[in-house]
Image (cartoon, coloured by chain):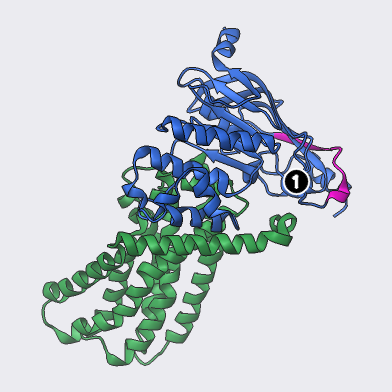
């Protein structure tokens, strides 16, 4: 398919929001941008308008070569709506490769909502979200290049620790199960069924997914809940290794993790500015 | 299948790996948690035993209604385990992680529907002709009934997965699944009964009915994964 054809079809704005064809265009070096340039109409429905522009990625890298060295996730004037309530609006942020972006703010400020927006599990009510300076064949919603650690651990209680990790490794098409168990100090618990684990051990099992499969972007929603100091140290080491490898971390946390090179996005100041 | 194109070099093997791992995991869970296969067969047997008790010992009558009764019992038993199909994955967050991978949710849906078929539809379809003796089932109908039920139960599991996906976020979704899915089971049952009833008043339509049943299964195989995946996605928004 010639590039001009891709552009022509997309300028019409006919593509549904999470269409995989976005990934197709991206893999040929075309950057997709989402934007929302229409105000809310009477029915409250929004019509996302999207277009593509040629980015500066080179073609000789191969379609799947990961070049995340200068990768950035940029949100501009982002707004999020949940259940008819505006959670936040006018949010700007930039997450850079090799740095951690810490989300701070009171409960209900929209930290989880922002992480879900970036993961592509929700759609912004306004503003743009773009992934810049990368050769990732990603659609604009990142999706498959993201590790999302939510409040739930995504583990099966009737499977053992090693079976849980083996499942995810198989699901993602290959992963380092022993390495993941070592990273979160689960090797001694390998044969235990997950229902016998304590809350903190379950959390560690959930976090072990980070070390299981290599993905450039980590979205962590209060990853330290239930962890003791030794496990927090393990998590921090894992995060530092990821940042050193040029990865991006966006984490909401109430405690200070001993991770260098972090930026802070404070939702409290955002709310003040809005008022 | 244009969306596969950008991932073609490694995407297909990745999808296959994801498909088999979901099947292996859900099958292990079904065995370990117990209940699902045993409960379904127990329920099936109970319905079949209750029927002659309610209708009286008229052997001619029982023989005439046996295929239809067995099919109704099959529909109800398959639905028993349907509402839990996506519930645990939704509650423990696995579904979101699966939705974020490069594997389309449709593949996950297909894998989970397959496991549902293996653990409830298939054992029931195999057991039904045996239980048919309780209803004085004509011995000539055992093989056609078995074939029709094994075929039709594929569509039953696929449609059950659609109902389960639509109600995944609801706490009391169980009864709602039955209300939503049972009307969709009507064509499967009509042609299933026809395919397993043999010759009626001299005309044998069972071959034609079986072909239509296969067509229904194929249509369900194409439509329901997309519909279920769309329903699941809308819940995650």
Give the percent coordinates (x, y) of residue B237: 53, 38
Q: Chain of mark 1?
A: A
Q: Is residue B3 left or right of residue B195?
A: right
Magenta part of the chain: A49-61
The chain coloured blue carries which letter? A
Q: Quadrant of residue A127?
A: top right
Q: Is residue A102 left or right of residue B179?
A: right
- Whether residue A87 is visible: yes
Give the percent coordinates (x, y) of residue B119: 37, 68
The chain coloured green carries which letter? B
- Say which of B112 and B1 sits in front: B112
Q: Badge 1: how crowded within 10 Å, few (<14), some, or many (20+)?
A: few
- Whether residue A122 is visible: no
Quadrant of the image for the N terminus of chain B? bottom right
Circle 1 residue: A66
What residue sits 47% from the left and 17% below the top? A106
In the rendered view, tell whether residue A97 sits above or below residue A192: above
What residue sits 39% from the left and 55% below the top? A160
- Say which of A20 and A142 sits in front: A142
């Amino acid at each position: 398919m010639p590039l001009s054809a891709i552009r022509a079809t997309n300028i019409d704005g006919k593509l549904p929001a999470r269409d995989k064809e976005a990934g197709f265009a991206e893999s040929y070096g075309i950057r997709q941008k989402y934007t929302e340039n229409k105000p809310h109409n009477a029915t409250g429905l929004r019509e996302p308008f999207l277009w593509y522009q040629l980015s500066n990625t080179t073609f000789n890298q191969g379609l799947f070569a990961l070049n995340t060295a200068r990768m950035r996730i940029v949100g501009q004037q982002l707004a999020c709506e949940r259940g008819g309530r505006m959670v936040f609006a006018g949010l700007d942020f930039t997450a850079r490769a090799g740095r951690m972006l810490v989300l701070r703010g009171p409960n209900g400020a929209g930290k989880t909502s922002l992480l879900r927006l970036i993961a592509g599990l929700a759609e912004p009510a306004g503003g743009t979200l773009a992934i810049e300076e990368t050769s990732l064949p990603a659609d604009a919603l990142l999706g498959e290049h993201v590790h999302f650690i939510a409040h739930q651990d995504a583990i099966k209680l009737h499977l053992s620790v090693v079976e849980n990790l083996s499942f995810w490794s198989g699901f993602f098409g290959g992963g380092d199960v022993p390495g993941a168990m070592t990273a979160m100090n689960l090797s001694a618990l390998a044969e235990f069924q997950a229902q016998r684990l304590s809350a903190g051990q379950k959390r560690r099992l959930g976090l072990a997914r980070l070390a299981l499969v290599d993905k450039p972007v980590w979205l962590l929603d209060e990853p330290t809940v239930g962890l003791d100091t030794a496990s927090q140290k393990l998590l921090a080491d894992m995060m530092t290794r990821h940042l050193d490898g040029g990865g991006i971390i966006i984490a909401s946390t109430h405690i200070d993790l001993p991770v260098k090179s972090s930026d802070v996005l404070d939702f409290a100041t955002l709310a003040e500015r809005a008022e | 299948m244009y969306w596969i194109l950008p991932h073609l070099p490694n995407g297909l093997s990745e999808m296959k790996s994801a498909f088999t791992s979901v099947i292996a995991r859900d099958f292990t869970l079904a065995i370990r948690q117990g209940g699902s296969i045993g409960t379904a067969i127990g329920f099936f047997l109970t319905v079949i035993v209750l029927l002659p008790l309610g209708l009286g010992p008229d052997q001619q009558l029982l023989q005439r209604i046996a295929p239809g009764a067995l099919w109704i019992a099959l529909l109800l038993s398959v639905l028993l385990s349907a509402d839990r199909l996506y519930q645990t994955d939704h509650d423990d967050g696995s579904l979101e992680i699966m939705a974020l991978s490069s594997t389309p949710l449709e593949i996950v849906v297909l894998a989970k529907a397959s496991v549902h078929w293996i653990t409830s539809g298939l054992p029931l379809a195999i057991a039904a002709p045996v239980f048919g003796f309780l209803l004085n089932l004509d011995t000539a109908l055992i093989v056609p009934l078995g074939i029709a039920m094994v075929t039709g139960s594929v569509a039953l599991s696929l449609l059950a997965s659609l109902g389960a996906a639509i109600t995944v976020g609801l706490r009391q979704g169980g009864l709602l699944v039955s209300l939503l899915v049972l009307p969709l089971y009507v064509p499967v049952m009509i042609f299933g009964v026809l395919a397993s009833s043999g010759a009626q008043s001299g005309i044998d339509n069972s071959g034609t009915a079986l072909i239509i049943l296969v067509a229904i299964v194929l249509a369900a195989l194409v439509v329901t994964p997309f519909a279920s995946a769309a329903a699941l996605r809308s819940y995650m928004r």
